[in-house]
Image: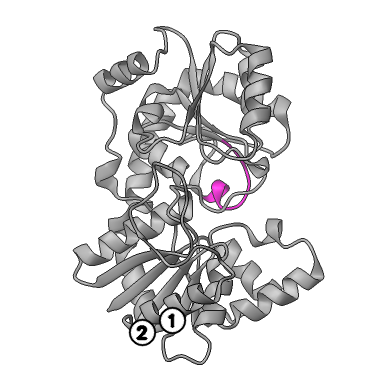
Amino acid sequence: MRSLHLITSPARRGAETFAVELAAELRRTGDEAQVVALTGTDDPTAHDVYVLGASRRSPSLVTALRSSARRADLVVAHGSSTLEACAIALAWTSTPFMYRTIGDPSYWVTTRARQIALGFLHRTAARHVALWQGAADQLVDRYRLSHDRIDVIPNAVPSHRWPLATEGERVAARAELGVEDGRPCFAFVGALSPEKDVAAVLEVARALPEAVVLIAGSGPENLRLESEAARIDPRRIRFLGSVTDPRPVYAAADLLLLPSLSEGMPGVVIEAGLVGTATVASAVGAVPEMIHHGRNGFLVAPRDHEAFIETVAAALPTARSAGQEAAADFDERFTMSAVAQAWHASLSRAH
């Protein structure tokens, strides 16, 4: 099988990183798989993939995508604007495409007109991949898709990149990141965008004055969050920017914090869990299917900052044992080797 995987840009975000890692797994098991991006990025940590065009709306991008698709049996569109790009570029061609829905359909579709437009685009795809059954059900309800055209395959990461951290590695990571012995350490890894509600992470730092908070990522909320952190305590709230390898951040942290208003099946929860760091997360999207409260992580209702702070404080004494549970559980459910067979079957059905 020759598959072409289309991402929005080479930036190291969830859908983009998954596509790169899935293609590597498919190549490892004997398939041909290539990743291309619609447009470029100025992110210095970006993935090294071929960029099709300078603008998502340019006619040359459509031509470039059609040309690349001719050399593939199937195109896999990974979230965001790749659905529209494939629907336009691959119309009246012999190359089918499948679409991987990465988020929560109930959060992003806010108007009836938007729902109708997205429904039309979704129905141009040969098949769909949803990350959890609830998302698949929403695709059926909102866009009139058929259940038999949707495969449910969870998010996954390559296990070799996220081995369980030893105690020595944790000590070294804390020293590297300037986290003093004995201080609680919390981490946020992801885009600094409104739906991530990173303000709740800063409220944790305000309420727990002994804690160090590591924030790895960038986005439109950067300046606002840094300004608020300066009012709380800039010595304890450290903005690391985009990082190529967040493993030391996970290893240094007692808990990963993810107070999002919307999520699909966040890869950062899987990565941190495999390293042995449990997550305190909002119960949105597929997160309740990943985290069993009090066992391999901790759940809180979204938008409730007070409850989020209380849960973080209460989770600290059992954080390490919850991290060990997460490592064992996620290794069975959310690694590339665990989902590879399902992806091979889905690609074959789409083709």
Q: Using the rendered image of the protein, determine whether residue 207 is visible from the camera's viewpoint.
A: no
- Which residue is more in the foreground, 223 or 329? 223
Where does residue 108 sit, x and y in percent of width and height? 69, 58
Residue topped by disc 2: 70
- Marks 1/2: CA–CA distance: 6 Å
Between 290 and 3, which is closer to the camera in this rendering? Answer: 3
Q: Are marks 1 and 2 in contact (CB under 8 Å)?
A: yes
Q: Residue at x 50, y 47 (%)?
A: 266
Residue 52 placement (x, y as % from top left): 43, 67
Left or right: where 145 falls relative to 25: right
Residue at the outermost right position: 112
Q: Residue at x 34, y 81 (%)?
A: 348
Three-letter residue code for mark 2: Arg
Q: Magenta stretch: residue 301 in it?
A: no
Q: Is residue 152 left or right of residue 175?
A: right
**Magenta span:** 281-289
Residue at numbered disc 1: 66
Q: Label 1 crowding class (10 Å Cα cut-off): few <14, some 14-19, many 20+?
A: some
Residue 168 visible (yes or no): yes
- Where is residue 44? Give x, y as percent: 40, 41
Q: Percent position (x, y) of residue 334?
A: 38, 52
Q: How packed is label 2: few (under 14 Cα within 10 Å), some, or many (20 or more)?
A: some
Asked whether, in this view, residue 110 is left or right of residue 23, the answer is right
Establish if 105 lies above or below 268. Answer: below
Dot 2: what SS?
helix
